[in-house]
Image (cartoon, rainbow, N blue to C red):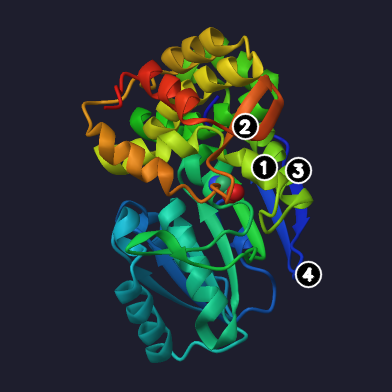
């Protein structure tokens, strides 16, 4: 499959702020031609360490293509980039290289890098253009798409804005080359799109596990995300369905210090149990089997149950009437629903957490 030509797939998405974003999925398209719109003469490339070589190559190609002054800055890996101090350092670097309002920021990396770059672009000089080249599966199907930017200020993503980049280029050849651990991480969000809206994604993972064809599942998951974000850019309602598995998953992620994708898989098992209790969902066993087939965890590691409960209590979907979770009536039928403490308790027990 790797490297074979594949027809480009494209989407256009527009925010309520009128900003338009082109999303392109293809193979062998991670070059400056796809990333940089014509008439840009100053480019600031932001990348994370594993991608520094790729970013250097792209920056060099931009310079060779002429008319382009491309500078590269390598930022810390993962969430270490999403800190106020790094935002400040990046602003100062942009000052130093003489970045101007007609310049372009090119972000090459995973979800943390595109979150940070989107935030810097939204705020530097009161807003400059940015394009993303997501290099992880999780970034390609979730973090990069939909215009959420953010940095961590004590809590995760506590400062940020909704703002689309002008372009997102997803090169499946780059994703093919990912280590299996990162593919599994991203598969959690990809199959989540399947559970909430596209059973064909579920079937693809059911059949082939982690080897499910990226040419099929990536565009399908992007389609789910684009459709949802088009309906509700600023998450005032429907967009919350993208958080399936995240209420309990996020709490386990923080309390146990495990990667996001693994936590979402565990959270979906818990949410499946709550869905069975509250809505009569009959797909819990199938859901668990698909996650196991991918090689994702379906029970939580040893963790402080009180801390998990405390974090769940603070979930941002809570309102004055209590905790709300995304549940499934069936595959493809997500519902955002108030849940009782007793139902949450059942969900936690399903993943091996026994509340005191
Ligand atoms: N990752 C969930 C969202 O973009 O809304």
Question: Could you tell me how far apart the alpha carbons at marks 2 and 3 are, in whole angstroms?
Answer: 11 Å
Q: Tell me how far mark 2 sits from mark 4, CA to CA.
A: 26 Å
Among the two numbered marks 2 and 3 on one chain, the one whose residue lies closer to the N terminus: 2
- Front residue of 128/171: it is 128
Q: Earlier in the sequence, mark 4 or mark 1?
A: 4
Q: CA distance from mark 4 to mark 1?
A: 18 Å
Residue 91 appears in the figure: yes
Considering only vertical position in the picture, is 313 above or below 287? below
Which residue occupies 44% across, 60% down? 157
Whether ligand 1 has any atom under 8 Å from the Cβ at mark 2 is answered as no
Q: Which mark is residue 95?
A: none
Quick check: marks 1 and 3 in contact, CB under 8 Å? yes
CA distance separating discs 1 and 3 = 5 Å
Residue 229, how many percent across, how many down? Answer: 71, 50
Mark 3 lies on residue = 227
- At which x and y percent is residue 274? 53, 22
Up/down of 96 relative to 333, above or below:
below
Splitting the image into 4 quarters, where does residue 183 fall?
top left
The answer to which quarter of the image holds residue 277 is: top right
First in sequence: mark 2 or mark 4?
4
User: What number is the disc on residue 193?
Assistant: 2
Reading the image, the residue beneath label 1 is 225
The answer to whether the beta carbon of the residue marked 4 is less than 8 Å from any atom of ligand 1 is: no
User: What residue is shown at x 58% (from left), y 85% (from top)?
Assistant: 126
Element under disc 1: helix
Q: Which residue is mark 4?
A: 18
């Amino acid at each position: 499959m790797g490297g074979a030509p594949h027809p480009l797939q494209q989407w256009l998405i527009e925010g309520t702020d009128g900003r338009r974003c082109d999303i392109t999925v293809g193979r062998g398209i991670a070059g400056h031609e796809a990333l940089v719109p014509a008439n840009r003469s100053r480019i600031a490339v932001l990348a994370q360490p594993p991608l520094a070589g790729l970013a250097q190559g792209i920056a060099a190609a931009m310079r060779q293509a002429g008319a382009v002054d491309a500078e590269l800055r390598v930022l810390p890996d993962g969430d270490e980039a999403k800190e106020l101090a790094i935002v400040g350092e990046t602003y100062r670097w942009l000052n130093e290289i003489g970045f101007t309002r007609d310049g372009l920021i090119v972000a090459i990396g995973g979800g943390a890098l595109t979150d940070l770059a989107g935030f810097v672009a939204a705020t530097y000089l009161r807003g400059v253009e940015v394009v993303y080249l997501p290099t992880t599966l999780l970034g390609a199907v979730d973090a990069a798409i939909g215009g959420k930017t953010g940095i961590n200020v004590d809590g995760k993503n506590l400062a940020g804005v909704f703002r689309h980049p002008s372009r997102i280029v997803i090169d499946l050849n780059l994703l093919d080359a990912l280590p299996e651990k990162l593919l599994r991480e991203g598969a959690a969000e990809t199959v989540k799109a399947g559970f909430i809206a596209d059973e064909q994604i579920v079937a693809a993972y059911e059949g082939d596990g982690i080897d499910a064809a990226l040419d099929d599942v990536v565009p399908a998951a992007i389609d789910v995300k684009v459709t949802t974000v088009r309906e509700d850019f600023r998450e005032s309602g429907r967009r919350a369905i993208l958080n399936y598995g995240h209420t309990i998953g996020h709490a386990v992620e923080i309390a146990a210090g495990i990667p996001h994708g693994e936590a979402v898989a565990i959270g979906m098992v818990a949410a499946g149990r709550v869905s069975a209790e509250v809505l009569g969902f009959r797909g819990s066993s199938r859901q668990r089997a698909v996650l196991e087939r991918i090689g994702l965890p379906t029970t939580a590691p040893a963790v402080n149950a009180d801390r998990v409960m405390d974090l769940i209590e603070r979930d941002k979907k809570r309102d004055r009437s209590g905790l709300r979770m995304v549940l499934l009536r069936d595959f493809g039928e997500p519902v955002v629903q108030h849940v009782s403490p007793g139902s949450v308790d059942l969900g936690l027990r399903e993943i091996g957490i026994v509340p005191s």
